[in-house]
Image (cartoon, rainbow, N blue to C red):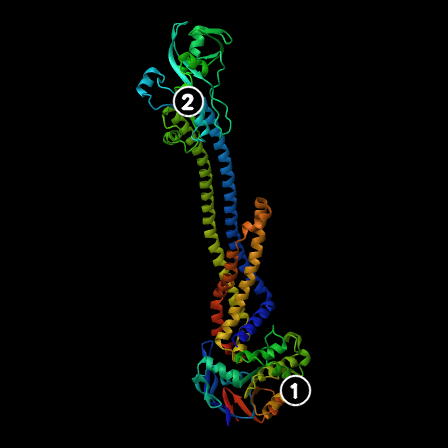
Amino acid sequence: MNVLEISGVSKRFSKNGRQIAALDGVSLAIEKGTFAAVRGPSGCGKSTLLLVAGGLLRPDAGNIRINGKDLYSLNAEQRALVRARSVGFVFQEYYLIPYLTIRENILSPALSIFAQEQGRRADELLQRFALSERGRHLPSELSAGERQRAALARAMLNRPELILADEPTGNLDEGNARIVLGCLREFTSSGGSVVLVTHDERAAGAADRTVRMEHGKTAD
Amino acid sequence: MQKYIVITIGYFALKELLHRRLNFFLSLFSVALATGCLVCAVGFLRLFDVETERIIAGKEREAKNLADSLQEEYRIIGTKMGFNILILPVRQHLEELYAEDYASQCMPEWYVDTLAHSGIITIQHLLPMLQRKVKWTETRRTIILVGTRGEVPLLHADAKKPIAEPVPPGKIILGSELCAGLRFPVGGRVQLLGRQFTVMRCYDERGTKDDITAWINLREAQEMFNKKGLINGIMALECNCAMANVALVRQEISRVLPGTQIIEFSSKALTRAESRARAAAFARQSVDNEKQNRIRLRAEKERFYSVLLPVILIACSLWVCLLAFANVWDRRAEIGIFRALGYRSATVVTIFLMRAFFIGLAGACTGIGAGMIAGIAQGLHVFGNGSAKAFVDPVVLFLIVLGTPMLSALACWLPSIAAVNQDPAAALRKE
């Protein structure tokens, strides 16, 4: 069964009066438990694909289905609920909330599904990502690797079925990159699916499947 | 569930405020400034009102003292003008009285004692007398001879300095015309209708029939006129009080002495009443002038505040609004991640409104504190330690604490909506 189905998705941006096709009829299906890597050079549309797939950026054409549900037939609030329950995001820049501690950052998705009893889950994730000692620290007090692990833990709090990761190892050294990829791998082993956007070959090597993107188009 | 969300969002908002301190303190300052000005304006008006009450009370005291002293002066002047009430036997024909200058009818002397013991309040200085127009055969002059025993004290009233002094037996007091015309020296001996008297005193010129009047002891007059135990009039002075008028005097005296009638010497009474009214009016005018002055000053202050306060409130609200927009701009990525985490629009709006609420609350408390310190310091030299009580209106403070966070949230409404409408992808996209 496909967790994510992307069918004929196109997205154009206007830049300096010119139309640029960030996505040009992209189609892709991600099965449950799959770790898929999308590779390509900078500016090929990888990040755009991820935002469209996560329901954050409406495509000009095509459909996105998550667990068979057409994402863009839903209104913004319904899409937010789908994201809250089924999708986790990880970004190269981490985007941790700077004034919350690491534990609070990991707990922050609970607000989207109004879950009160997530404390134990957060502690479990802190332990799993080797951040137990860092729970009370602010993101600014952590290393890049720790921040990315915290971002990954945050993405997993609501037990999503799909993680959309945009260059999660881009700012990491080899050791930390290995840990993060290991965590993603582990996530797929437990039934989750991952779409990893990267131009890093090592990262792509950890995936079950690699999709190549160029000029807004995919080629397996 | 709602409580959990509000607490969590409130917690997030507080942490964010402490994280972005510059924006927070600029917003806080702005709200505190507006609130402080409001507290000061309301407080200063209250201080002004209390000060007005104090000044008016002082003025009223001063005016009362002045009125009392003026009334006393007028009373003394009025008293010097002499008696203005004459009590006569009821059978006395007035045309005869006016033609002859004395009453031919008599009444018992004890009437005056009855009156003095009656507790009457509308008249004072009771002077019983027996008078006749007589031919002073020894000097070939027509005079008015008055026998009097002096004023009879009212038992229920404080003793007052008498207008007319008593004449002891064997003594005589003469009017100025008699003294001057007959050249009788004080202490000299005179013969009147066959009796010897010593001149006790000569009155100054009064310009009335008193100038041709001779006063002797009542007993001697009663003997001379063969009217033992009788008098033909009681002179009195209408009291110098607001409620006194001739109708009331008549009513009171008729109740005590039914067999009498009362004449008021209207010009004297009128002068006394006018004097009294003028003194009271002068005092009232003085207080009214001060009241009008204070009302005018208060209106000026109100006008000033009614211009100043809206300007400050609008300027501060705009400033808070701009700072909130700046905060939204600063937090674009954060808003993007909120949306990526699946936060609904209402949750995002609440995060920003809650932030504005806390700014309003903290600003209100700070502004109230600063405003009170300023107001109390200002009031200290006027009211001393009572200035805090005079300055603070708990209801106004409560409304400010309640209203300011609402206003702050209202000022941040547009920025909050802007935050919700922000495209999360624009903030999160790198390409």
Q: Position of residue A88 (x, y in %)?
A: 55, 84
Chain letter of disc 2 in the image? B
In the picture shown, does residue A143 fall above or below B267?
A: below
Given the image, on which type of amino acid does mark 2 rest?
A: Met
In the picture shown, does residue A199 fall above or below B195?
A: below
Q: Residue at x 47, y 82 (%)?
A: A79
In the picture shown, does residue B317 fall above or below B87?
A: below
**At numbered mark 1, what does the secondary structure look like: helix, strand or loop?**
helix
User: Do we see residue B208 in this rendering?
Assistant: no
Category of crowding for the residue at label 1, using alpha-carbon neighbours closer than 10 angstroms: few (below 14), some (14–19), many (at least 20) = some
In the picture shown, does residue B159 fall above or below B170?
A: below
Please tell me how many numbered marks the rendered image carries.
2
Comparing B156 with A111, the one in front is B156
Q: Position of residue B54 (x, y in %)?
A: 52, 42
Q: Label 2: which residue?
A: B235
Quadrant of residue B96 in the image?
Answer: top left
Quick check: do tags 1 and 2 share a chain? no
Q: Label 1: which residue?
A: A179
Q: Residue at x 45, y 38 (%)?
A: B289
- Residue placed furthest toward the left: B95
